[in-house]
Image (spheres, helix red, strand yellow):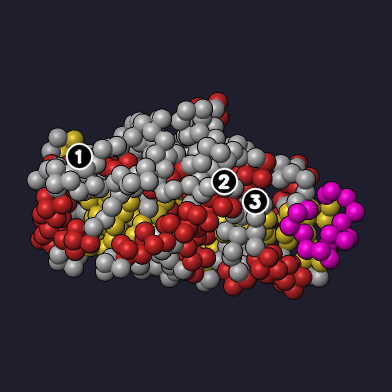
Amino acid sequence: MMQIGLNVFWDKTDFHPHSKIMLTSEARLDFAVCHINAVNKSLDTVCAIAESVSDRFHALGLPYIANFEQANFDRSCKGPDGFEWANHPDGTHRMVFPERMLKALNKNGNLLGILYDELEHMIINRNAGIGINARLNVFPLPEKPSVLNDGAELKRDLTPYVAQIKNSNIQHFAGEHVFPVLYHLFAASGITPNFKSQKESFSNVQYAIASGAALEYGTELWNCVDMWFMRRHPGHSAREMYNNLVFAYESGITRVYVESSAAMVEGSTINEYGRAFIRFTHEYQGKPRPFEISDLRPKIAIIRYDDTYWGQSGILLWKRILFGDERLKPGPRQKEYLHVFHLLTHGETCRGGINWGRFTPWSLRKHRSFASMGSVCVFDENVRSPKLESLELCFLCGEFISEETLKDVGSLVKNKGLVAVTTRRFLPSHVQSRCRRSTGVIPDGKGKWIVVKSFKSARLKRLLSAYLGNKGEIHLCFSDHESKLRISQDGDALTIANNLEKGMDK
């Protein structure tokens, strides 16, 4: 059963008026998300605030998630008592979560988890929220830069960081991703995948990547329906927000919440956003659902090593670097999966990136929440056969895929009829010996390999037309359930294709 929440904001001593109105409205909430600003305060003060937050949500009968974001914007984070909240002796900058504060937040046993807002953004953009030229790494970079070394070093540092927090009786530690990167490495380190929909992304492309991480690593999947677009709030319509919430239900999301209550109130009156949100909670809160994210059974997969490239194209902002390391620049291998998404979405995503945050002419297009796409998941380089059994088609791309994963893919091609699309570098040796040209279709047992020079090939599109589904539709497959969702002309609303009288284009 999906849990529904709302992101509310904490003022110095009380909730903002818009938060109070929505928390006491007819909305049927399962939880809340609350921003807490710890930086620049003494530890005693923060612990007192934390206990007060826990008490107030306890009085409302709501469990809550504590959201920490302010360290992303403040370079100097030391409290008047000398407690350092984010700056470390090695020059790195990341939030500290003292055990005493964590216990205070959970005073009433109602803390669902800690949310480090936009942690992936801070890592890949070197705490750019503090300033374009802040150049503050979240964790130390390796002495010898390489795509594989930087990823391994990040995981080595991230895993104990997360463990320290979760060892304080914290059930979940989550990020909140603006950019469609680091879901798998985070999940492998103990961080619950949590993607922003709407925002500047295609919601179902973000979902395809985040759901792959959740499925591969056996975690919940959270979803923040974010009302920001670039610098506008609200930057999306109430209709678009409502349909993103419905998509969360249809796609097996564990917890969904809207950011934020500020969009839902004008003065003392609940506006169209608030009414649409309340309507959704009445229709879906507690609604049975015969599947969860663990039941996801994709038909198509992209398997790749996550090198943190999503199409960043800026000179100053969103620099063309990997892992926040200015010594690492993206090359052709980093771009391959973007070309695959362009193919899988019938050309609706940009070949160069999958986020409106790119500084290119493509980004001048009007934002759309939903792209045409079949049942797609993205897995990392270590995914194993049990997660791949449902596949009909997979793409092997990027910098690196483990030998164990390649062996499993080869077995599925040979014995289960999987179609695997790859450049020559990921072909098994027995297929390499039969590959006389740089491209071609090579049968192998029950399945086949399609060898390409580039995933941009027009011939590849023709070869795979039977797998790509219909333009204007989203296909979601679970173990005992399938949904086809039709996308509205403007890309912001959905209709359940097999139940048209219950359309959502309102």
Q: Is residue 174 above or below residue 386?
A: above
State which quarter of the image contains the C terminus: top left
Q: Position of residue 490 (x, y in %)?
A: 48, 37
Pointer 2 residue = 145
Q: In this view, does 218 lie above or below 274?
A: below
Q: Where is residue 91 in the image (x, y as percent from the top left)?
A: 37, 42
Query: For the point 87% across and 56% down, which residue is it?
Result: 435
Q: Position of residue 109 (x, y in %)?
A: 18, 68
- Answer left or right for 291 relative to 77: right
Specify the amino acid type for callout 2. Pro
The stretch in magenta equals: 424-439
Specify the amino acid type for callout 3. Glu
Task: Give the mark, 1 or 3, whose residue is nearer the N terminus.
Answer: 1
For the residues labelled 1 and 2, the Cα–Cα distance comes to: 49 Å
Q: Would residue 208 be seen by someone viewing this image from the given angle?
A: no
Q: Where is residue 251 in the image (x, y as percent from the top left)?
A: 46, 59
Q: Would residue 385 be seen by someone viewing this image from the given angle?
A: yes
Which residue occupies the foreground of this view, 468 or 302?
Answer: 302
Specify the amino acid type for callout 1. Val
Q: Is residue 224 above or below residue 367?
A: below
For the residues labelled 1 and 3, the Cα–Cα distance comes to: 47 Å
Magenta stretch: residue 479 in it?
no
Pointer 3 residue = 399
